Amino acid sequence: MIGNKKRVVGLIWSQFAAYHTDRCEAVARRLGDDCEVLAIEVATTSTLYAWDPSGEVAGARKVTLFPGRSFDDISPWQRFRAMLRAARGCDTVCIGISYAEPDAIALSWTLRLLGKQVIVFSESKFDDRRRSIWVELIKSITLGCYSAAVVGGRRHIDYFRFLGFRARPVLPGYDVVGLDRIRRQSGGILAPQGLPFADRSFLFVGRFVEKKNLLTLVAGYARYAALAGPKARRLVLVGSGEEEALLRDRAAALGVAGLVDFTGFLNAEAVSRALAGALALVLVSREEQWGLVVNEALALGLPAIVSNEVGSRDLLVRNLINGFVVESGCVEGLARAMLQIGSDPATWEAMVAASHERAWLGDADRLADALEILLVPGTADTAGRVERLMVELETEPK
């Protein structure tokens, strides 16, 4: 910082959802005395996510490069030029667009050549898919322009170490949401407040696509319903997507169509209200880089049943403590987890208390912690919180 000129920190994503706004606002609150925060949204919409258009970002200057347009309809060359124009006045640029996108590669290297500090945001981990050693080698070269990485949990840290970040800092804190926002949207109803234990349902939130493993979820639920009998709780599926017809057919074939509710796509506020009345979140994906809905569930004190593949289990879910970690292909294991959490109020209340204790680990302030450590002289409190996160990650189930 020269004279009274503040350092400018840019944060770039392809499209903003509520949680991107959470992160930008948390960083602006924390770094506002030392830095100006520029929140850069490339486009208003995309074909992948049906999020509501984003608004202003408190404490930061926000720009949308292609307002009213879809990210996927803009050529990589156009995106690159617009992002470079927006970011070239920054001292540090944090890039949350996939580092495999050609425009993100070109932008990160160009900014580095212009003398900027470039930080990658990522939730990739090694077990997301089959890996090729040659692709990983090229990827490690591509990532050579980044001075640091802010990622999700232990598996994400290990993956970036594998990709060549041996001396460069790799910190947790990327996959976060605004806990206060979630709680406001729920009407301030945090478990065990709200609906009585007996009236709560199991809840899934997400896209109806193959990697979410929803056909197995419905099969596991049907097995649970058979075990629970007349006391079986309902299963609420929030979202939409290409597999909806298959899911309805599967539920009918297994005899549980009358117990499974399809709400359609819900906006962020409606999701928070749905979570407030749920018994537990269920997310048993076969591929899941993180799963931010787990953060949202813990914000309201809900336990979570997640598969091993879900990245957020590294930090947010402890088996038998605030939920269950199950095998994504094991119908019986999922059913037994649902039966245990749905039949014993004492078990549920203990898990609710544990989720409240862990919720802070997924708050947007954790991204502010990471960037404070990387960009400005951090306080002892900040360093202590980051150290606590690292300790939690070291004690994750292997």
Image (cartoon, helix red, strand yellow):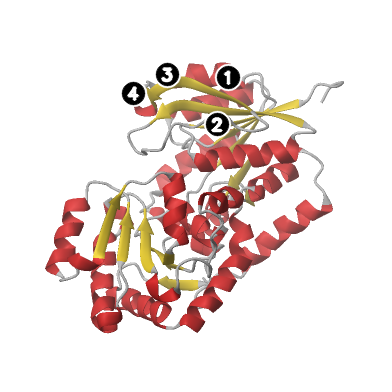
Disc 1 marks which amino acid? Ala
**Distance (Cα) linking label 4 and label 2:** 18 Å
Kindly identify the residue that appears in the image at 50 percent across and 48 percent down.
Answer: 123
Indicate the position of residue 292 as horizontal and vertical percent values.
Answer: 48, 52
N-term mark: 3 or 2: 2
N-term mark: 1 or 4: 4
Q: Which residue is mark 3?
A: 77
Q: Are marks 2 and 1 in contact (CB under 8 Å)?
A: yes
**Distance (Cα) linking label 1 and label 4:** 19 Å
Report the front residue among 229 and 365.
229
Disc 2 on helix, strand or loop? strand
Q: Which residue is mark 2?
A: 12
Label annotation for residue 73: 4
**Distance (Cα) linking label 1 and label 3:** 14 Å
Q: Which residue is mark 1?
A: 86
**Distance (Cα) linking label 2 and label 1:** 10 Å
Report the front residue among 212 and 77.
212
Kindly identify the residue that appears in the image at 49 percent across and 60 percent down.
Answer: 297
Classed neighbour count for the residue bearing mark 2: other residues with Cα under 10 Å, few (<14), some (14–19), many (≥20)? many
N-term mark: 1 or 3: 3
Q: Quadrant of the N terminus?
A: top right
